[in-house]
Structures are given as structure tokens and as C-alpha cells.
Amino acid sequence: MSTIIIFSIILLAVLGIAIGLLLGVAGKAFHVEVDERVTQVRECLPGNNCGGCGFPGCDGLADAIVAGTAPVNGCPVGGAPVAAEIGKIMGVDAGAATKKVAFVKCAGTCEKAKNKYEYVGIPDCRAAAAIPGAGGKACSSGCLGLGSCVDVCQFDAIHVSSDGIAVVDREKCVACGKCVDTCPKHLIELIPYASEKFKTFYMVQCSSTDKGPAVMKVCEAGCIGCGICEKSCNFDAVHVENNIAHIDPEKCRGCGLCSMKCPKKVIIDINTGLPKEAPAKKEA
């Protein structure tokens, strides 16, 4: 074996030992202590990395919970069971977390809503909303039905029905909020899954802020801001603002009077998805 080869082998061996020693020293010098609770909390989280908590994935939420910048019940996917486990790790009460679901504020089906033109393009609501006229639907606030919300849902909880509007499966929805952020018409909001005190509550299935005559020209199922619902409510739960009725789920007692009185039948029972029918008149 030549002297050059032997020298090369020795040199490589020395370099390897030197680099190993340097890495060992650097590892100790720059070592950062990791709170073991971060790992424990992360193991409790479901791992969907949906971002519904407002942090960059489950790792980000675990860091924030341990740092005290996020509540122990901050994971919308895990719900109360996960919050309870994390509460044990953190030594705090998880508290009562209100389960929420997404709600689509549009009843403008193909049968009830008019189109101003036929949209031919990328099957994406955001793309359609970006062109002149903001999509083919005549109501500027109406669901375009192209399924951008469906594409971002990891839980198979929202679909576009055969009559052209997005519908949420309340049992599958985990309130991650991705559909809310994605909808270019801002038609989707997170609402309580159920009333804490009463059997149900009612919501307005419309988001148009146009005046009544303009709404009626383009949709049979749009809120016209007539105020009958507000006048009918005895619990201060309904108010008409900017030509659209809003219902406060915390004040609604589920009597359904506003739904029965609504001339456009756009106030629905959150459990059935239907307006409340007036009781049948008794025959004399």
C-alpha cells in the first residue's frame, strides 16, 4: 500500500474524529430543553393538522397550549374528550367547550335562484367569483355551488347537493373552519351545534344585504328584510340589520314563531333544516 493511500486513510480518520467531537460539543452548547408536556399534549391531539385551532398544525397548538397562549380546549376536532386529557396534563380544568358546526347561509337552489349567465370555466367558486359579475348566479351573495368548500374539507362533512348549494353534514363537521375561510361569498359561519337550554334554535338561511325588491327579482328564497321576524320575537333574539335578519342562538328559545311568520320561509330549525309550519286550523 502506498504512502499516499495510508496518509489519506489516517487523515480521513482524524477528520472524522474531529468532526464528531465538534458536533458533540455543539450539541451540548446549543441544546434546548423541551418541555415534556409539549410531547404529551401533541400525542393527545388528533393529528389532522387542519389549522382550525388558529395555529400551524397540531405541533403549533401543542406548543401554544404549554406556553399558555392557547386554551386546553383549543382543538375543534378533538372536542371535549381531547380537551379533558390535555387538561389533566396541564393541571387545569378543560371547561365546557361548545360544540360548533358550519352553517351555509343560502337557500338559493337551482329552482329558486336565477342565473344571469352560464358560467363556463374552472370548477372553483373562487375562480368564478373573481370574474366580472362574480359568478353566474344572479344573487351576488348566493352559493355558486362549485365546491371549493368541499375540496378543502378533510372530514367529508360538506357537499354540493343536486340542487346546487352546499350542505353541511352536522354529524361529520368538526368546525375546523376551512370552509368558512374558503368561501368567496362568505356564506358559511360556525354556529353552536345545539342550544344549551332549549330543544332547538333557528337560523336565517340567507346572507343577501340587498333591499327586498332586488332580492325578490333574483331569488324566491331570499330574506327581504321585512322585519316581521323581529316584531314576532318575544325574546330579543332577532334583529334586521343592513336589510338582512340575524338571530342570536344564545337568545333564541326555539319557539319558531319567527319561522312561521317569515313570508319567504328562510328561517329554519337548525335540527331539521326546515321552516316551522303553522299549526293546522281546527275545523269548526
Image (spheres, helix red, strand yellow):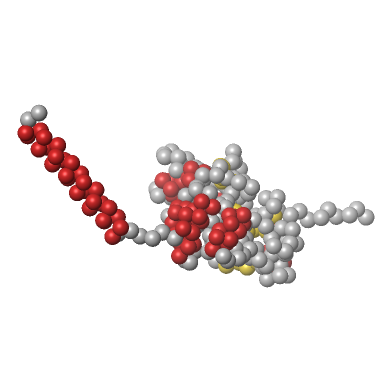
Q: Quadrant of the N terminus?
A: top left
Q: Position of residue 147 (x, y in %)?
A: 50, 43
Residue lying furthest left in this view? 3
In the displayed structure, 87 sits above or below 120; it is: below
Q: Is residue 230 visible?
A: no
Q: Is residue 161 visible?
A: yes
Q: Position of residue 26 (x, y in %)?
A: 26, 56
Which residue lies at the image location 54% right of the left edge and 52% below the top edge? 44
Residue lying furthest right in this view? 284
Q: Position of residue 258 (x, y in %)?
A: 71, 62
Please name whichever residue, 121 or 56, is drawn nearer the observer in this view of the structure: 56
Q: Quadrant of the C terminus?
A: bottom right
Q: Quadrant of residue 63?
A: bottom left
Please name whichever residue, 139 or 272, is drawn nearer the observer in this view of the structure: 272
In the displayed structure, 274 sits above or below 195; it is: above
Q: Position of residue 23 (x, y in %)?
A: 25, 51
Report the side of 256 relative to 95 (left or right). right
Q: Quadrant of residue 226?
A: bottom right
Which residue lies at the image location 71% right of the left edge and 70% below the top edge? 235
Which residue lies at the image location 20% right of the left edge and 44% below the top edge? 16
* Picture mark count: 0
In the displayed structure, 111 sits above or below 98; it is: above
Report the side of 249 relative to 234 (left or right). left
Which residue lies at the image location 70% right of the left edge and 50% below the top edge? 272
